[in-house]
Amino acid sequence: MESPFRIRFIAAASLTLMGLSLFLIHCSQSQKEGSQPRVVSTHRDVNVLLITVDTLRADYLSCYGGKIVPTSNMDALASRGVRFAQAFAQVPLTAPSHACILTGTYPPVHKLRDNGGFILDSGVPTLASITQQAGFETAAFVAAAVLDHYYGLNRGFNSYIDEMTTKRGKGALPGVVPEVRAEIITGRALNWLDTQLQRGVGRTPMQNFFLWVHYYDPHFPYDPPAPYRTRYAKNLYGGEVAYADAQVGVLLKGLADRGLQERTLVVLMGDHGESLGEHGEYTHGVFLYDSTLHIPLIMAGPGLAPKRVITQQLRTIDIMPTIVQWLGLSPGDKAQGVSIVPALTQGKVMPTTFAYSETIYPKTNLGWSELRAVRTPEYKLIQAPTPELYQLETDPGESRNVTHQYSEEVAQLQKKIQEVRGADSAQGILERQPISSETLRQLQSLGYATAGAGRDLRLDMSGPDPKDRVQVLEIIERSSRMINQHHYRSALPLLQGAVHSDPTNPFLYHLLGLCLQQLGQFQQAVQIFQQAIANKVDTDQMQAELGNSYLQLGDLQRAVDAMETAAGMNMADLQNLTNLATLYLQLRRPADAERTLRAILAEDDRYAEAYNLLGTLEIQRGQAELARGHFEKAVEYDPDLAEVYVNLGLLAENAGQPQQAVAYYKKFLEKADPRKHGPLIPKIKAAISSIERGQ
Ligand SMILES: [Zn+2]
């Protein structure tokens, strides 16, 4: 059927040929009240599928010379497209690196400097906002809570699916976040494709989509499913890579089976690598060596020649301008990367010589100096308390610091770093805005005057040089492994020694406090958290754990104080607020409880635990009907939240509906976790038999 838009598009396409991109069509029917008018501009008639595989080392792909894992699906993509042999991440951390990929800017511009506690600058265009403006249907499926919509990467996506299938468990290691396995992500993405195809999106001329699919599996903790777990028992990271490759295969086959391969530009890449012990680092985030910065990058699709390998250096900030130019759109004036389309089409060498990288993770998490680096094809300069220069051609493993032999190169590269970091204030103080301005406004309207009192962070290279602390990294690695296997007692002496030698490292206090809590030594845990506070390295998580420890010791007032401090330090952490609201309820402070629960729902109106607590609050107030409504919402938003079924059961019993009550209680038993609900389980069983006896 002839689309009424067909003629306009053809007219528009000819205008583009003449170099004019002013031809805009207002789609008034899709305009929402108060939102930006949706503008459809001309673009190349292709879909875009961006696949980011988290924590994927380039040298684990067979097409990059990897020998451990056969990555046949990623290799197949490379053989029908272009493989970039020298692609480098700007930040070895998930959220900041994805911000570079999507915005084409360095962290001082996009502002998402670290995982958690930083929000993407709302004024920087993203690949999603640009394609959405151009009329693309946009969707993202992300697999880890560090990419929650909260941090702003959802901007420009019509649909941004960040629902996690795991929760932050009690006793989870710091940095271990809720995630979703790759097969679930693949399923969600293919379902979305089917829905779009039914609407004609994806295969009708000029009705295109931009789809971003994120796989998190190779990220620590390494936990591949069968059969990869046994096949790669000696290298579980490799097992995760093999599993991710298989899922990439399912996704790409799904694309081909739906007739979309010839109409879709596929870009597959890592967000950063993994150290795996190199340079004394085990995961990523601390150092700026190629172990964590070298990433695989493959592009394939209509118009791209197969089996090509491009060896010029490429940066994650070049991805957005490249895709956008390939589509015939403009990246806007904020982008700092360059489009390498001329390299793709004409083999031209583009000005991507200087790749800036940074990590503030050592400062935010370990109390050490932040690091910055600039990489050229010949050299890498790492700006650290003791600077490092590596000559990459003769020393690709970055093992011989040659700073003293090349002072001119050092000076020139330092200038390049300065150019990029210029956006930071002169004193190096980075104001941390952990919540969005909209959330801030909502929280303030609820009476949280101190909400979002951003903590300043000094990026002045103060603190120990991370490379002088590799022995601490080793202890963190060893003790984390012990904690993962619940060997808390073995981890204790290691961590106590490390805290003694590195007393301003917040991560060590986290781990030590965690072990003590797991061993039931709450008084000692309180002491450890207070030591961290005295050393001014406490975090909201530590204050929250201090509150939990006081709770275990029965000191409710101190628990409330600590949890209020935690919530004030980071209002973004809804778990902190949930714990606080629970305590207010226990202390019979209904007004404070309600205010806190409303704050949670202002941020996430599908937060099941908050509805459960609101229900409990209404019970305290004698409002059974209101309570029931809240409990039902809680079940609707999270059918696995076991305790709600007890509440619904109690309500049913009180309302003289014993059958219904038994059904709810049985549901609870089905969902209950013996570790969490241990003492409640026998009581509920007794209640069931008592009701059944009475009938
Ligand atoms: Zn990552």
Image (cartoon, helix red, strand yellow):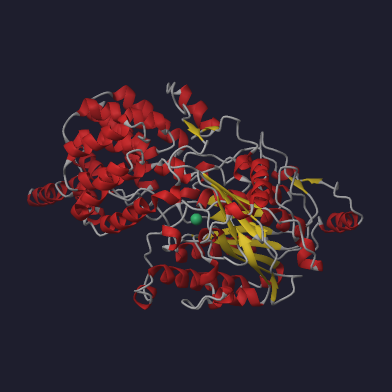
Q: Which residue lies furthest to the right in this view?
A: 18
Q: Can residue 606 be seen in this view?
A: no
Q: Position of residue 558 (x, y in %)?
A: 23, 27
Q: Can residue 212 be seen in this view?
A: yes
Q: Where is residue 159 in the image (x, y as percent from the top left)?
A: 57, 51
Q: In which quarter of the image is residue 293?
A: bottom right
Left or right, 543 with respect to 385, comes to left
Q: Which residue is drawn at 18% across and 53% down?
A: 489
Q: Using the image, determine if residue 268 lies above or below residue 602.
A: below
Q: In which quarter of the image is residue 281?
A: bottom left
Left or right, 413 with respect to 615, comes to right
Q: Residue at x 12, y 50 (%)?
A: 682
Residue toward you, 492 or 635: 492
Residue toward you, 682 or 246: 246
Q: Using the image, determine if residue 655 lies above or below residue 443.
A: below
Q: Residue furthest front?
A: 405
Q: Where is residue 10 in the image (x, y as percent from the top left)?
A: 86, 59
Residue toward you, 364 or 73: 364
Q: Quadrant of the N terminus?
A: bottom right
Q: Which residue is drawn at 33% across and 33% down?
A: 614
Q: Using the image, determine if residue 572 lies above or below residue 405.
A: above
Tell me how many marks there are: 0
Q: Position of residue 359 (x, y in %)?
A: 52, 47
Residue toward you, 488 or 9: 488
Q: Residue at x 71, y 42 (%)?
A: 334
Left or right, 354 with respect to 177, comes to right
Q: Using the image, determine if residue 270 lies above or below residue 387.
A: below
